[in-house]
Image (cartoon, coloured by chain):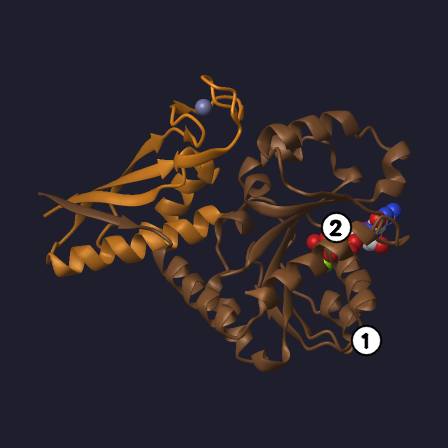
Chain colours: A brown, B orange
Amino acid sequence: MEIKVMKRVLDRNQDKAEQIRALLKENHVRMYNLISSPGAGKTTLLEQTCRHLGPDYGVGIIEGDVYTDRDARRLQSYGFPIVLINTEGGCHLDSNSISGALQEFNLQNLRLLFVENVGNLVCPSHFDLGETSKIAVVSTSEGDDKPIKYPMLFRDARAVVLNKMDLLEYTDFDYNHFISDLRQVNPTVPLFETSSTKGQGLEGWFHWLEQEMKEQMNK
Amino acid sequence: MHEVAIVNDLFRIVLDVAEKEKLKKVDKVHFQLGKMMQVVPDLFKFAFDSAKADTLAAEAELEIEFLPVRMKCRQCGTEFELKQQNFQCPDCQGMDLDMVQGRELIVKSIEGE
Ligand SMILES: Nc1nc2c(ncn2[C@@H]2O[C@H](COP(=O)(O)OP(=O)(O)OP(=O)(O)O)[C@@H](O)[C@H]2O)c(=O)[nH]1
Ligand SMILES: [Mg+2]
Ligand SMILES: [Zn+2]
């Protein structure tokens, strides 16, 4: 006997994500889901961003880490509320874990919530967390072929950060190739070229974030 | 390894239906999989075989129907199949496209008795 089912897998994740999206909207909080390969520079970029925005900006952070609390500890000194989600080996965050983490925040005091996803380019791009937008972070030390290999992420991303620009000359990263591939996949996404450790090239990223936040206030 | 999370959720659905329909065993699962989901078929099958042990679906076979990625041009309305990640309309060269197919993860039907 064949039974027709026609049910979408992961629809519970999707439903939860939509609930989160509504909750954040109600509280005027924007949530950015940072996705990259391991070590591309998400935590360093967040450190710089926290430093720039200062403790009164209403920033919160959700740290997705496979086993440790190292990244969360690096970010602790900036005085923002941080909630750590250990995925116990899991390769991505899901909306259920975000929903639990959100209960630890006082949303009324927040404007901007960063989620550092688990370092991985495939899995996190397929799990909606209820974020306002996804941000893709890539670095010059991991090759220039990421946009073509992971088109879903680069199409969904609302901004792309190309980090470790200071290492460009020491790698075989083909900058022009990267740009043409990125533009093939996503012709319009804003691109920020940064060196997070040196604090270089971050003005554009900060400016973009501030514009985004203004949009929120006018809504 | 989102394959594992997908397979686990797939089993939740399959076993749910099997229970509702009072099946004694599940023989086959028909699954539709959009190519944009970047699922590795071998990993997926392996995860499926690991998950099915000791369930009603212990002997079930997984049949995957791969769905190609299809895009629709917002400018001229042309629909086309995406090849080599070339996100450009073949008719008007427009690049403002919507994905109309490619992200499916659908349990289409199950066979059992
Ligand atoms: N040269 C250089 N090194 C960088 C830059 N940004 C980060 N790094 C270094 O790269 C390493 C990884 O940076 P993280 O910020 O921890 O990267 P991450 O994406 O948070 O890593 P995971 O959380 O493990 O996925 C650290 O040693 C950083 O100091 C950069 O712009 N230039
Ligand atoms: Mg990190
Ligand atoms: Zn067209």
Of circles 1 and 2, the one toward us is 1
Residue drawn at 82 percent across, 28 percent down? A172
Q: Are marks 1 and 2 on the same chain?
A: yes
Query: Dot 2, crowdedness within 10 Å: few (<14), some or many (≥20)?
Result: some
Residue A185 place in picture, x, y as percent: 58, 32
Residue B78 place in picture, x, y as percent: 38, 24
Work out whether B80 lies above or below B19: above
Return the residue at label 1: A77
| A94 displayed left or right of A61 | left
Under 8 Å from ligand 1: the CB of mark 2?
yes
Return the residue at label 2: A39
Work out whether B95 lies above or below A8: above
Q: Nearer the viewer, residue A55 or B106?
A: A55
Residue A210, quarter of the rendered image: bottom right
Residue B55 place in picture, x, y as percent: 26, 56
Q: Check disc 1 and give the amino acid type.
A: Ser
| B99 displayed left or right of A69 | left
